[in-house]
Image (spheres, helix red, strand yellow):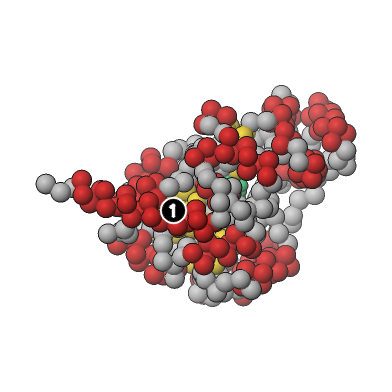
């Protein structure tokens, strides 16, 4: 059997044929076309709302709905609760200004979304037909969880340790996304600096049979064999980012996709130097220059907004050395092609892997 009883039940609740969730990928990759392609193929498509205004989110939902009636998830960033420090050290300001001047980008400034943006995003989510809403970078207020559940939505939040997963369950969420150390881009769990690093296998081993909620596994999974391993370890579904980041429908720049495929483990790093929060990507010139002044850099989301202008300018110029080249550790085994072809390959491999395991259990 390809699916476990746990994943069969979860897939039934979501209305998806396969236990595969397209990871929300903020900052460009998650186009409506990519979201729709995965939903049409039999998975759960996710809109990354983190960097969208409420109006932009509503537009994104409409664009996906013009392409598919398949199951849809939304992902929202929880704003930090503490007061933000906007201070950039003198050396850090010089480095950022210098890079901006080199690229012809405007002088870096910080403008961060307010709590009202979050409330408005939640309202759009509650009024949408999304079957699942996931939260990243913290726990939403209990009233928000209950509001979405009352609207019939499954609510999930991201954890980077087993302890965080226990907190997610205790807060009343229906599911926890266990994000392993292997994962691409930001550490999405509850720690403010994104500095909790546990591998996915260990997270799943710790969570197995010990959480009262469904577990979604995430980090470094690029194949059906990887999905089978996660299901065998108790996951209800697997959330996959990097394997879809390089597909035709993804909005990642061509040079970003190329860097992901060319990467090997040793070339990806978790750094807080680009955004103020630990995130995994290919090490490039931007990482090297900002790492030198890391102790003078503010936390997320302030630093993220200081660097976003120059990173966007690097994208416009097609310059990979100054973009954020987020990727998981398995980027080098990703394959370009349509999202449908990647999805179908993973599903075929899942069946083969499950047959192989069943076969090896024979006397
Ligand atoms: C480019 C990129 C952007 C991402 N953006 C988000 C996001 O907006 N919200 C979120 O919860 N996770 C985000 N993630 C993390 C994914 O949810 C997931 O944990 C990760 O992709 C899993 O590892 P993998 O990339 O090896 O599959 C992002 C990942 C990538 C690669």
Q: Position of residue 188 (x, y in %)?
A: 56, 47
| Residue ID at (63%, 39%) | 258
Q: Is residue 64 left or right of residue 15?
A: right
The single residue placed furthest to the left in the displayed view is 363
Position of residue 11 in the picture relative to residue 103 (left or right):
left
Q: Residue at x 32, y 59 (%)?
A: 3
Residue 306: percent from the left, percent from the top?
Answer: 78, 41
Examine the rendered structure and indicate whether residue 123 appears above or below residue 249. Answer: below
Residue at the limit of the structure toward the top, as seen here: 292
**Left or right position of 171 against 259:** left
**Residue 276 percent location from the top left of the image:** 68, 38
Q: Residue at x 66, y 48 (%)?
A: 252
Classify 10 Å Cα crowding around label 1: few (below 14), some (14-19), many (20 and above). few
Q: Quadrant of the N terminus?
A: bottom left
In the rendered image, the vertical position of residue 155 relative to residue 331, given as above or below = below
| In this view, 39 is above or below 186 | below
**Total numbered labels:** 1
Please state the horizontal and vertical placement of residue 334, each as a whole percent of the image: 52, 43
Task: Residue 136: tell me if it is visible.
Answer: no
Q: In the rendered image, is residue 282 in sight? A: yes
Helix, strand or loop for disc 1: helix
**Which one is in front, 61 or 317?**
317
Label 1 near ligand 1 (CB < 8 Å): no
Residue drawn at 76 percent across, 51 percent down: 112
Question: In this figure, which residue is indicated by the disc labeled 1?
Answer: 345
């Amino acid at each position: 059997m390809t699916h476990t009883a746990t994943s069969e039940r979860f897939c039934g609740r979501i209305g998806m044929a396969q236990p595969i969730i397209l990871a929300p990928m903020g900052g460009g990759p998650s186009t409506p076309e990519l979201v729709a392609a995965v939903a049409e193929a039999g998975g759960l498509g996710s809109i990354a709302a983190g960097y969208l205004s409420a109006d932009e989110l509503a537009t994104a939902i409409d664009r996906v709905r013009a392409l598919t009636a398949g199951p849809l998830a939304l992902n929202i960033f929880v704003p930090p609760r503490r007061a933000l420090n906007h201070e950039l050290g003198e050396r850090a300001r010089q480095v950022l200004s210098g890079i901006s001047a080199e690229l012809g980008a405007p002088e870096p400034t910080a403008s961060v979304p307010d709590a009202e943006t979050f409330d408005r995003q939640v309202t759009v989510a509650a009024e949408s037909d999304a079957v699942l809403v996931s939260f990243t970078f913290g726990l939403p207020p209990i009233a928000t969880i209950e509001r979405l559940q009352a609207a019939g939505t499954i609510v999930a939040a991201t954890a980077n340790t087993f302890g965080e997963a226990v907190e997610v369950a205790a807060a009343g969420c229906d599911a926890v996304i266990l994000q392993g150390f292997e994962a691409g881009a930001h550490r999405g769990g509850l720690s403010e600096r994104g500095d909790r690093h546990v591998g996915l296998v260990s997270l799943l081993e710790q969570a197995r049979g010990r959480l009262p909620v469904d577990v979604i596994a995430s980090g470094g999974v690029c194949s059906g064999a990887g999905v089978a391993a996660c299901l065998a370890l108790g996951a209800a579904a697997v959330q996959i980012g990097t394997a879809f980041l390089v597909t035709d429908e993804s909005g990642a720049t061509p040079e970003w996709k190329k860097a992901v495929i060319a990467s090997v483990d040793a070339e990806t790093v978790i750094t807080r130097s680009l955004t103020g929060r630990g995130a995994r990507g290919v090490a490039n010139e931007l990482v090297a220059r900002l790492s030198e002044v890391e102790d003078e850099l503010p936390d997320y989301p302030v630093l993220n907004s200081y660097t976003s202008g120059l990173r966007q300018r690097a994208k416009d110029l097609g310059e990979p050395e100054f973009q954020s080249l987020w990727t998981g550790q398995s980027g080098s085994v990703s394959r370009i092609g349509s999202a449908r072809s990647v999805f179908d390959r993973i599903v075929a491999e899942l069946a083969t892997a499950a047959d192989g395991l069943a076969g090896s259990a024979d006397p």
